[in-house]
Structures are given as structure tokens and as C-alpha cells.
Image: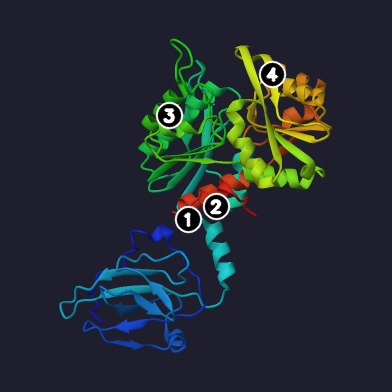
Amino acid sequence: MDDNRPPLLPSPHHHRQRMLHTPWLDFYRRSPDGNSSPMDGHAAAATAPSVITTATTAPTTPTIANGVHHRGVDGTFEEDDPLPLHLHPRTDGNSVGWEGALCYAASHSSEEQELAFRRKMPNVKVFSGSSHCDLAQKVVDRLGIELGKVVLKKFSNQETCVEIGESVRGEDVYIIQSGCGEVNDNLMELLIMINACKIASASRVTAVIPCFPYARQDKKDKSRAPISAKLVANMLSVAGADHIITMDLHASQIQGFFDIPVDNLYAEPAVLKWIRENIPEWRNGIIVSPDAGGAKRVTAIADRLNVEFALIHKERKKANEVDSMVLVGEVKDRVAILVDDMADTCGTICHAAGKLLEAGASKVYAILTHGIFSGPAISRINKACFEAVVVTNTIPQDQHMKECPKIQCIDVSMILAEAIRRTHNGESVSYLFSHVPM
């Protein structure tokens, strides 16, 4: 083999390939005339270097190694193929073919190798904004990496200052910042962090926004009303975001406001798990939507649990004030489980809980993805007749849980961490729409 051959280059799809999957090495050597002669895999492993060996393969036909198909000459292969293959053309002038590099693991099981690969997460930097540092720490703990170094402060005139404390050149950067607390300051901080990483030559910048800010301003429902969610989408794109990961958007159509990929994750699998584990009478339950807009979300959960659903039609005089409610469905002597994407001042869910008890419900639970709990929310929940108000930690809940013992929290950090891992590795995230990562 010519020593002047070009160096091995990774496939353009190298981020999709799962390395170190098998403790043996086997391959076919295919000559330029198309004839094949198998090499014994165990004999090859005995003499092969411990990491990489090379083989000559045909430029047109997929290689078969112990029944494993390596499809195509660009190094790509199906996800269930154990051996990744990197290929480049030979240029020695004597024959036309391809050099393939097969990665070989000598001593570890495939499960251990997979775990090590997942936890190593090369070329990834995860930074946290100031809105929810606890969630960001849980995400990186799950990934087995450290949070990136960043200094966030304000000048004396209250302008936001961001200093990225380590190199991000060529890195896959994820910035975790939720739309809560001081929403405007946190949004501006996120935009500056995105731009700082982008102009520092990060290869890709993904904004992980568990609770999307201004999501309720998603349509022009009266004269001269702004569509602020579209404005936020434009700002994120202009700042330099290449990808958005969020959870339970108030309206899924907000994804269409972006010209970049958006992954809208669902808390539904975690909610289903909580219901089955914490409500003993859930089989005698009924899932209730506090408004018509949440009917689709509620029917999906009811179908998964194989129970019935109901909805409450509400009319508002003005923002954050509900005028009247009409219950559609039978809840008498049943456990009512209110499900919504968010609760702000909690006027809606507290009125709905009272309506359900008047209609004969035996118990009332409320399950919400985003617990904003602003204004009189906590006092209203304390006075209401809930068995429990369950929220996720897309927004910090520690203080709320101290003030109100009815509030319980579902951790969704494992869903966000798995979404980051799959995005980085070029894998599908649709698995997360129906499963909770272990």
C-alpha cells in the first residue's frame, strides 16, 4: 500500500456514527476487478493495531463484514450497523479503490462503549444564562460534562455584559436560558450570549429555551396588537442562533415564526409517568382542559391513559380576568385532572377547580408545564381546593414550593439533556415525544 496516500478523513456524516461498538474486527478486501477474498476477523484482530486498521474496498459496492452492511462510499451507514467506516479515494496511480478505516475496541462491551460515548460528548459547550442555573447544572450533570465558563453582569447603567470565559471556536454550543423572572433582561442576556459565541467562531449555536418568552402574544387578536412572539423569533435568528430547543410552546404554530430548525419538546411523557405513579385512582379519572385551546393536549393525554376528557369554556373580560365558565363533560364522583401548558396568576385554574367540585368531582389535581405564578397566584392556590398543583422545573420553583405546600415539581432536565445529546450526534429527537429518558 502506498505510503503517500492521503490521510484518513472523517466522513461528512461522522457525527452520526457510533464509534467503538464491537470487540472484534472483520472486513472484506475487495480488489479493483471486483473479486472478493474474506479475511478471518479473529486472525485480523490478533495482528491488527489496537485502534485502527485499513482495508481496500470497492468504490461502488457496499462492503459486507460478518453480515454487517456498510452502505455507500461516503462512509455513511444505518444506525444499527456496528462498525463505522470512513472512506477516501486512493490516488496511488496503480488502481482505483477506497481506503476504509474500521474502528476496533479490544476489551469493553458494547454497552460500556455506548455509555462512554454518550458521556464524553466531545466538541460540546453548554453555557447557562442567569435565569435558571439549577436546571442548567442538572442538564450538564446528566450529560457528564461541565458548564462552560461565562461571566454575566450589569454595568452601572444596567446594560448587560457577557464575557465568554473559554474558547468556543469550532464547538457545538448550547445556551440554556428560560423565559422567566426578569423576562426582558434574560432575553437580552440570551441574545448577547448567542451573538458572542457566534462571532467567536462557534460552529453552531443552539438556544435551549425551556419556557419561551412572549409565547402568549402569538396572534393579532385585536386592532393594533403586536405579534411579539414573531419579533422574539426574529431577534434570536438575527443574533445568530442556528437552532432552537424549547418545551410545550403555548401555540405550536410559533415554530413557523422561525426560518431555523425548532424542536418543540413535550412534557406529556413525564406528566403521564407522574399521574400513574402518584394518583392511585387515576383509572377513575377524567382529564380536563381549562379552555378550548388546550383540547388537543388534553385528548392526547386522555387517549394515552385510556380515560375520558372534558373541557371548560371560558370568556375573559380582559387579560388575567375570567368572566364566566361552562363545563362540557361529566365529572361526578371522579378524580378531575386539570392539564394546561402554563399558569400565571392562576385565576383560570382556581375557577376551574371550583367549577369541577360544584359538578361533583371527588378530587381535583392541576398539572401545568410552566408554573409562572405571578401576582396573587400563590395565595389563590393556597385557598383553592386542589389536592396538588404539579409543575415542571422549566421555571425555578424552589421559592414557590416553600410558600405553597400544594405545589409539586417534575424534573424535565433529563428530557432537555437527551435532546442536546441527540441533536449533537445528529439523531432524531422524536423518541422524546412519547418516552421519558431513563
Mark 2 or mark 3, earlier in chain: 3
Q: Residue at x 47, y 71 (%)?
A: 82
Residue 321 horizontal/vertical position (percent): 65, 13
Task: Tell me the tag on residue 325.
Answer: 4
Report the amino acid beneath label 2: Tyr
Q: Do tag 2 and tag 4 residues touch (Cβ < 8 Å)?
A: no
Task: Check disc 4 and report its element: helix, strand or loop.
Answer: strand
Of the two numbered discs 3 and 4 on the same chain, state the one appearing first in sequence.
3
Residue 358's x, y, as percent?
Answer: 81, 22
Instruction: Tell me which numbered mark, 1 or 4, is placed earlier along the sequence.
Output: 1
Disc nearer the start of the sequence (3/1): 1
Kindly identify the amino acid type of the residue bearing the numbered disc 4: Met
Residue 233: which disc? 3
Circle 3: residue type: Ala
Q: Which residue is mark 1?
A: 122
Q: Looking at the rendering, in which quadrant would you find the C terminus?
A: bottom right
Q: Answer yes or no: do the residues labelled 2 and 3 have beta carbons within 8 Å?
A: no
Residue sitting nearer the eye, 281 or 202: 281
Tell me: 338 left or right of 74.
right
| Tag nearer the camera, 2 or 4 | 4
Mark 3 surroundings: few (<14), some (14-19) or many (≥20) residues within 10 A: many
* Location of residue 408 by image quarter: top right
Q: Please tell me whether mark 3 sits on a helix, a strand or a loop.
A: helix
In this rendering, which labeled residue sits more in front, label 3 or label 1?
A: 3
